[in-house]
Image: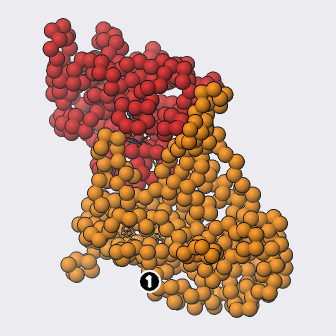
Amino acid sequence: MQNPYQPYPVRIDEVIDAVEDKSLKTFRFVFLNPEDEEKFSYRAGQFAELSVTGQGEIPIGIASSPTEKGFIMFTVFKVGKVTSYLHNMKAGDIMGVRGPMGNWYPWDSLEGKNIVIIGGGFAFTTLRSSIVYMLDSANRSKFKDIHVIYGARMPGLLLYRDELYEWEKRDDIHMHITVDGTDDPDWKYNVGFVPTITEQKAPSADADTCAIVCGPPIMIKFTLPVLENLGYSHDQIIMSLENRMKCGIGMCGRCNIGKEFVCKDGPVFTMDQLSQTPREY
Amino acid sequence: MKIVKIDKTDWSAGLQRSRESYRLVGPIKGENDDFAGIRELGEGEEPDLTATDTVLSPKSIVYPQSEIMFEYTTDKDSPDANLLIRPEKNYSPCAVVGIRPYDAAAFLLVRKNFDTPEYRDPYWCDAYEASTFIGLAVNRPDSTDFSTSTGSGPFSEKGLDALLVDTGDHYLAKLITEKGEAYVKAAGWKTEADPDTALKQIEEMKAVAEARISSAVAFENIRKKTILELYEADFWEDIAFSCINCGTCTYLCPTCWCFDIQDENRGTNGIRYKNWDSCMYPLFSLHGSGHNPRGTKVMRVRQRFMHKLKYFLDKYDDGIMCVGCGRCVRSCPVNIDIRRVCDIMNSYGTVENACTV
Ligand SMILES: Cc1cc2nc3c(=O)[nH]c(=O)nc-3n(C[C@H](O)[C@H](O)[C@H](O)COP(=O)(O)OP(=O)(O)OC[C@H]3O[C@@H](n4cnc5c(N)ncnc54)[C@H](O)[C@@H]3O)c2cc1C
Ligand code: SF4
Ligand code: SF4
Ligand code: FES
């Protein structure tokens, strides 16, 4: 068995400013050893530990989709020690990636269903991975209607803006992009908080509909009652959690909620599962 | 079951012979040490079998308080720039002589964490697998020992390769595994005892030792209750009231395994290393955003006891994450006693408990 703490060496291929205020950057990595790309076989919803030698490691959701080959992609918000250092790194620099880690959105049981994706702020990374995965021509027919409700404070803070606007043009996905407010007279999409737009645009639940919800705690808090009103039961609401992490493999002991480790048994849980664990996240 | 009789006059010579093929680890109190500990023994040092009840558990043999995982250089001109390289470490056979039975049992519990179907922590596992555990039965357990009720006990063989029983002028060595046999062979102790008489003697001594243990924990009702029932119970404030979050209980516990990972640099050279960590500290779970899901002392104390007495029990269905060594009971500066906490949790919501309220 390989050393689970040993990252795969990667080269930064490209660094992209992800939002206008530069608080988020998107990093594309290429594996130094091509065979590692195969070992790093992942599903949408998983995360990895980015290892910045000399600084430490950070758990970050995988923003690329398994259907995209030749690179992996992450979008990182500048918070503290490691993320700040990473923001100053350049294309060509060598670092490491350890993973993939954790579980993923339950793709097998989601097949044949309507999927409603609800995201807010920068918690849209693994949701992007999921959308790209579902829209891939090999996969689109496996899912029924796809709705996406995604909001940020203002247009410049939406992640993956170009892709969002492209998806708006497609007829096999219902996009509901929104911002809390904007003074841009040309803004063509919604204005309003994510819970409000969810109330207006999300389909009511039937047995064949599931919602995947990722966002800041305040958004989650107000979106859940809306979904309940729309008829979603707790096993139809899927969420992805964050907790402070180190090992990412269920060993260092810090990320648990009850007997579950967010890093290994999660980060993806249904509301139903979460209602049976302590709210330590 | 083979039992070998070791005359104490041949003890030192045997240890010396075993050193040709084993590194020796054992309890010892060095000249400059405040108290005895279990560590690798240097030339001329012997395990001190009167000092097996160490303040710190022997977990550091397999799981050092601080351990280098990788070395690296960040020098951009080096061909290895930013690559992580695991340093060489001595994993040659090592005999741990004089470990207490409950401390050996603790390794089996911790192994569940580090050696899993999905991942194997090579640092812990390599060191564990290199070790042969030669335990010393405890003839006179002290008042804080409650190991029998946790599935271990003063003569327990769990996790041991051989068990030594001190009968006065000789040791009886019960050989439990092939590793244990190999060690005794390497030490050149050959005199086989008559198994029937020796076993009878050991059983008698075991009964005497177990009878001396006066405290016990019960967790049958903890098993039956849900995690949330116990988590939301009203007694946690009371239990945590006097705790000062010093972390002592977690550092000296043989079954506590939580750790931190850090990078440390000197110029362009550096190491990534593991350090024992403690759920008693706020930093343990603090998010980068400032949010802390276990932000208060009460939440952290609850985490420690819930992990040991409920989460582990539910997760593996193999008892609690405590071997009853009593170290945390003896060393807690404010006398928080896991036996009492276990009792409160176990009797919570039962009829007896309701009457006393
Ligand atoms: C499953 C998962 C997915 C995530 N996905 C993303 C993402 O796609 N984009 C993004 O920008 N952020 C993501 N985060 C949050 C990100 O991990 C933290 O912002 C980051 O670890 C902060 O590191 P730092 O060194 O800059 O902060 P510091 O506060 O200096 O933290 C020091 C160390 O503490 C740990 N730590 C601190 N905060 C967190 C946290 N919230 N979660 C986990 N470990 C933490 C890390 O080991 C970190 O190196 C995710 C977290 C988790 C658990
Ligand atoms: S030793 Fe006692 S005071 Fe210190 S953290 Fe443990 S329970 Fe609290
Ligand atoms: S919790 Fe206390 S009594 Fe139990 S194994 Fe740890 S130190 Fe020993
Ligand atoms: S990050 Fe170490 S146990 Fe989850």
Chain of the residue on which disc 1 is drawn: B
Look at the picture and state if B25 lies above or below B194. Answer: above
Look at the picture and state if B282 lies above or below A99. Answer: below
Q: Quadrant of the N terminus of chain B?
A: bottom right
Q: Residue at x 20, y 14 (%)?
A: A189
Q: Which residue is drawn at 33% across and 37% down?
A: A239
| Residue B211 visible, this orientation | yes
Quarter of the image where one finds residue B190: bottom right
- Residue nearest the viewer, comparing B34 with B241: B34
Q: Which residue is the site of mark 1?
A: B215
Q: How crowded is mark 1: few (under 14 residues within 10 Å), some or many (20 or more)?
A: some
Look at the picture and state if A146 lies above or below B149. Answer: above
Q: Which residue is drawn at 61% across and 80% down?
A: B51
- Residue B142 on image: x %, y %: 51, 85
- Residue A28 on image: x %, y %: 48, 21
Quarter of the image where one finds residue B227: bottom left
- Residue nearest the viewer, comparing B214 with A84: A84
* Left or right of residue B3, residue A52 in this image: left
| Residue A51 visible, this orientation | no
Palette colour of chain A: red
Q: In which quarter of the image is the C terminus of chain B?
A: bottom left
Q: What element carries label 1?
A: loop
